[in-house]
Image (tube, rainbow, N blue to C red):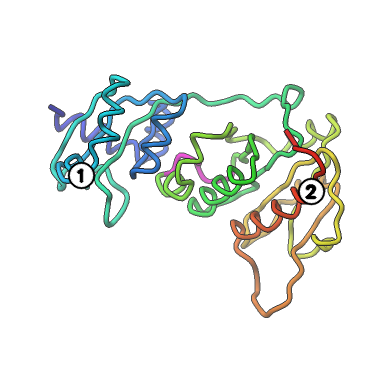
Amino acid sequence: MITRNELKYYASLSQKKFRESELKFVAEGLKNVTEGLKSHFTCEIILTTFEFAEQHKTILNEAKKKKVRIETIRSQDFIRISETKSPQGIAAVFKYGKLNFYPDKTESKILVYLDNISDPGNLGTIIRTCDWFGINEILISKFSVDYLNPKAIRASMGSIFHLYIFEELDSEVLADLQSKNFKIICSDLDGKNLFEFKFPEKFVLVFSNEAVGPSDWVKKIADEIITIPKIGNAESLNVAIASGIILSRALSNQTTHFI
């Protein structure tokens, strides 16, 4: 039986400072928990409502086989750890370790660098989009939102468990990658037409905060700046949507698999 203090402890993981001090995070929803259980991440506990447990016995049986602790709690108690208005009734606590990125050891030919992305929903969606297109490594600047933010995790739909994600990186990592023959390609409102651009063999795609655009350092170091040509009257394009368009075009330029 779970205690009140334990519930309070798991609820505290919604805050970044506690996630970082405890090296744990909460993944909420059936898809996220399912993907988490299949990954290399260690699951500490699954919390579920009585209603969910009655209707979804398969996933709980799989968790039992892995000897994961399962606690069934009242809906009003589940709300204490939930970040959604209408929770599905399942959440899991996973342990994690921060990864160190070494430019000289990466085997990827295409990397994605997230420059000052402030919206967790956008960040999670970009992670999901990268997963769809087979990007294995994502670099996140130290000024971007935490990728283990509950909203980012929900938007990723389990993709955070599939990729290598390196966080709180200085933009100087781009210079290090340039020295390893990676071209830095930055997306912005003004640049070369994406659909006329020929992508190199090895490159880093930089996606930035849509409100303020690329940081000064990124624009200074970028080898190329590209843009999705505007046809209509919209002022700007959501960065998560733009990432999908650019990744689709970038990969269509590759004659062989890029990993």
Q: Is residue 107 left or right of residue 179?
A: left
Instruction: State the residue in front, 236 or 70.
Output: 70
As measured in the structure, the alpha-carbon distance from the residue carrying label 2 to the one carrying label 1 is 48 Å
Task: State the quadrant of the N terminus.
Answer: top left
Residue at image coords 85%, 30%? 179
| Residue displayed at 16% across by 29% down | 2
Check disc 2 and give the amino acid type.
Ile
**Label 2 with label 1: CB-CB less than 8 Å:** no
Residue 224: percent from the left, percent from the top? 84, 51
Instruction: Report the front residue among 105 and 253.
Output: 253
- Start-end of magenta stretch: 143-149
Give the amino acid type for the residue marked by disc 1 in the picture.
Gln
* Residue 19 horizontal/vertical position (percent): 40, 32
Q: Quadrant of residue 35?
A: top left
100 or 17: nearer the eye?
100
Instruction: Rate crowding at label 1 as few (under 14), some (14 to 19) or many (20 or more) other CA atoms within 10 Å.
Output: few
Left or right of 193 on screen, residue 236: left
The residue where tag 2 is placed is 185
Does 249 lie within the magenta span? no
Q: Secondary structure at mark 2?
A: strand
- Badge 1 marks a residue whose secondary structure is helix
> What's the mark number on residue 55?
1
Q: Residue 64 at x, y = what percent?
A: 26, 24
Sequence-first tag of 2 and 1: 1
Relative height, residue 138 to residue 107 (above, below): below
Instruction: Give the image quarter of residue 140.
Output: top right
